[in-house]
Amino acid sequence: MQFILYSLGGQYFKKGHFKQSNAIDNQFLKFWPNHLDVIFRAAYAKHKLNQNTQALELVKKLKRLEPQGLYNSYILEMIIYLSNNKIGKFNQIFNELLSQPEELLKLNDDTYRYLIFFTLASKDLSEHAPILYKKYSENHSYSCEVENNIAVHYFNLELFDNAAQHVMQAFEKGSSCLNPELIKLLEEKDLIVTKPN
């Protein structure tokens, strides 16, 4: 029964059917209340259903249960605060996560990947992007998403040559996830060429 509920809830969750996944995961958690994946899914689904108070309660529970080096609770908490425009709380949680020991932060590539992404949301956090990019690169394999986000970071600072450099690195890897608007703007500045003459 556990596997059936877990799989069914996961299928609905992956398809974005959060009402259904939430109902199944709530039942699952009655029997297996400390299952990390399902707590995360239930919290995210509640957030998507605009039940953010309940989502944050599950985030607190997840934070207590997660082993060291797994920070999905922090990431989800930042997503919730950001989507509700609570930038002060968002920045606070970002800094709490960033203050964790380096040897734990580097264990899961999601941690640095999301931290880089989150620096785009707040001017107060922007200064961390280059350092986080360096740490990601030292500890994890190439990610188009990370290259895109650091390129956007430099573009926002009007450091267009740096942005173009990261876009070209992504092109060299054959990546196709880059922001089309970013590519267009860099082409207009004659900093990159994507089409042969």
Image (spheres, rainbow, N blue to C red):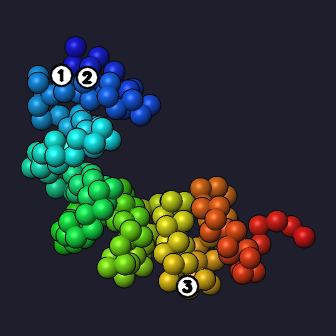
The quarter of the picture where the C terminus appears is bottom right
Three-letter amino acid code at disc 1? Gln
Tell me what residue is drawn at x 32 percent, y 24 percent: 20
Determine the CA span between mark 2 and mark 1: 5 Å
Relative to 67, residue 112 above or below: below
Relative to 162, residue 84 above or below: above
Relative to 131, residue 43 above or below: above
- Count residues near mark 2 (Cα–Cα under 10 Å), then give few for <14, some for 14-19, many for 20+: many
Left or right: 13 in relation to 100: right
Q: Are marks 2 and 1 in contact (CB under 8 Å)?
A: yes
Residue 169 position, x and y percent, is 62, 70
Residue 137 position, x and y percent, is 44, 69
Observer-nearest of 94 and 172: 94
Q: Which residue is mark 1?
A: 27
Q: Quadrant of residue 108?
A: bottom left
Q: Which residue is mark 3?
A: 158
The answer to which of marks 3 and 1 sits earlier in the sequence is 1
